Amino acid sequence: MSDVFGLVLPFFGLIFLGYLLARLTRQPLEALGWMNTFVIYLALPALFFQLLARTPFERLGEWTFILGSVLATFAVFVAMFAVSMVRRDAAIAPATIKGLAAAYGNIGYMGPGLALLAFGEEAAVPVALIFCFENIMHFTIAPLMMALAGSDRTPPGELALTVIKRIVLHPFIIATAFGVLAAYFAFRPPAPAERLLEFLARAAAPCALFAMGVSLALRPLKRVPTELGLIAALKLAVHPLLCWLLLSALGNFPESWVYTAVLLAALPTATNVFVIAQQYDVWVQRASASILLTTVLSVGTVTALLYAITSGLLPADLFP
């Protein structure tokens, strides 16, 4: 158990330090802009590119694995959306944000650092695959559902173009595509470029976690949603359980891949849910509360999950 605490405490400690420093120094939220730019456009893309470029190309085509992990996420979204729509005050737009809060985990900022720390470089490929395909799903669902709700009156052709551009031009997805190409052609960058990529990649996890802590501190908890208990249960318990069951049923994958997928499914609500809520001016303060409280609760749930994995309580394949 001490090994697990040794793993997660520094990780969540960086989030706490970002939170604490933001509270003490009282910098405006805009001051975080360049840190987020560095993480999103340089550090994490460098990490994804490096890890994928070093991976044998044949390992990047595990479509059954992608199907299982993405299907688990989509099922959780549909479940929360359906529950929200049966309420008396049901509306598509807030139900969409609630569904995203229950299904969209922090796989960008928290996922790579924690998975690589827990399972080593074997986790690199499943992290990148899950990130790419889940983000494609989220980038598609949000504008589509908001268009159906009437919150986005963009013409269908322009909406489709916007979705495609958001997917194709996302820095993480561009870096992943280049990483796959580098793996296919067995390309290695020149030594100076590789050292620069290594330098950027090492900064990814600490900067991302610190920035996440600052973001949580600068978005005060004003409204606690009545659905928070259900959102937290779906995000932190049902999502990883469903992911584990689906991957066990669909194929025989490497242990590190299954555990990585389950760990990513167990992560708290992504900060992007707040960004999407703010973009459409729907369920904004409650989205912020969902992120903050699921992140706090995840300290216990993620620690328990890692203990179950490292102690052998959770087999990688339920149906060997």
Image: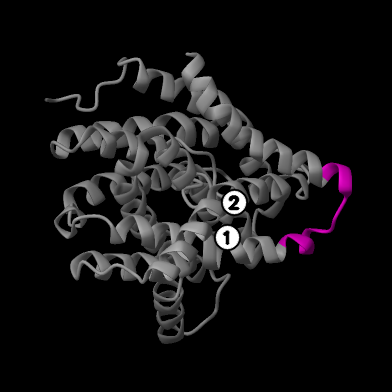
Q: How is the image coloured?
A: one colour
Q: Where residue 273 sits in the image (x, y, percent)?
A: 57, 54
Q: Is residue 85 left or right of 174 when viewed as pictured?
A: right
- Where residue 173 sits, quadrant-wise, is bottom left
**Tag 2–tag 1 contact (CB < 8 Å):** yes
Q: Tell me which residue sits at (71%, 65%) in the image.
A: 33
Asked whether 28 falls inside the magenta stretch, the response is yes
Disc 2/disc 1 C-alpha distance (Å): 6 Å
Instruction: Say which element carries label 2.
Output: helix
Residue 213 or residue 43, whichever sits in front: 43
Quadrant in which residue 217 is drawn: top right
Tell me residue 35's x, y (percent): 67, 61
Q: Nearer the viewer, residue 221 or 30?
A: 30
Can you see residue 228? no
Name the residue at 33% across, 40% down: 261
Q: Hey, what amino acid is under mark 1?
A: Val
- Residue topped by disc 1: 39
Mark 1: few/some/many CA within 10 Å (<14, 14-19, 20+): many
- Circle number at residue 208: 2
| Helix, strand or loop for the magenta stretch, by majority | helix
SS at circle 1: helix
Q: Which residues are magenta?
A: 23-32
> Who is closer to the viewer here, 167 or 56?
56
Q: Of callouts 2 and 1, which one flags the residue occurring earlier in the amino acid sequence?
A: 1
Q: Is residue 90 above or below residue 254?
A: below
Q: Position of residue 127 (x, y in %)?
A: 36, 48
Query: In the shown orientation, is residue 247 left or right of residue 286?
Result: left
> In the drawing, does residue 235 fall left or right of residue 15?
left
